[in-house]
Image (spheres, rainbow, N blue to C red):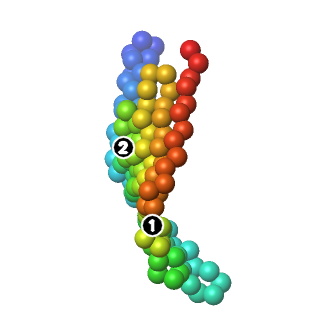
């Protein structure tokens, strides 16, 4: 095999491996974790990721569950957290050409907003 063919073959293999890596990263991934303490009580956490979005839930040793859902897009991010007491909070971030605007709202209706401006 001459050097030119070997170079072409090497370039093709590198490209194929890169494409396989990109295809694998687009698939949904799940992770399940169980932690057992010294007293025998357990807590579990389940996480699912897909295309930048994340959903997770955690159940403590007392059986109470909290969750978090995050949806990402090119325009911004939407997130919601639910605590074990049933209260929720949402975070909404909108991207702009000069920065971003983020608003957090609690289940009690209180809000806070952060405006970020990037310098050109």
Q: Residue furthest right?
A: 38
Q: Nearer the viewer, residue 6 or 73?
A: 73
- Where residue 12 sits, quadrant-wise, is top left
In the rendering, at what x and y percent does residue 51 appear? 36, 43
State the residue position of label 1. 87
Any part of residue 22 in sight: no
Q: Residue 103's x, y, as percent?
A: 47, 43
Relative to 115, does residue 33 appear above or below in the rendering? below
The residue furthest bottom is 39
Q: Which residue occupies the foreground of this view, 49 or 114?
A: 114
Q: Which residue is mark 2?
A: 51
* Rendered location of residue 1, percent (x, y): 40, 18
The kind of secondary structure element at disc 1 is: loop
- What residue do we see at 42% from left, 35% from top? 94
Within 10 Å of the Cα at label 1, are there few (<14), some (14-19), or many (20+) other Cα atoms?
A: few
Disc 2 versus disc 1: distance between alpha carbons?
A: 27 Å
**From the viewer's perspective, is the residue at label 2 or at label 1 nearer?**
1
Q: Nearer the viewer, residue 9 or 28?
A: 28
Give the structural element (helix, strand or loop) at label 2.
Answer: loop
Instruction: Say if mark 2 contacts mark 1, CB within 8 Å.
Output: no
Q: Earlier in the sequence, mark 2 or mark 1?
A: 2
Q: Is residue 43 above or below residue 114?
A: below
């Amino acid at each position: 095999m001459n050097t030119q063919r070997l170079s072409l073959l090497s370039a093709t293999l590198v490209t194929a491996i890169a494409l396989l890596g990109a295809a694998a990263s687009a698939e949904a991934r799940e992770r399940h974790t169980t932690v057992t303490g010294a007293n025998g009580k357990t807590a579990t956490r389940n996480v699912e990721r897909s295309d930048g979005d994340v959903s997770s839930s955690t159940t403590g040793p007392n059986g109470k569950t909290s969750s978090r859902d995050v949806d990402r897009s090119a325009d911004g991010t939407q997130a919601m957290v639910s605590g074990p007491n049933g209260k929720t909070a949402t975070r909404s971030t909108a991207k702009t050409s000069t920065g971003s605007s983020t608003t957090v709202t609690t289940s009690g209706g209180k809000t806070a907003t952060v405006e970020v401006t990037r310098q050109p």
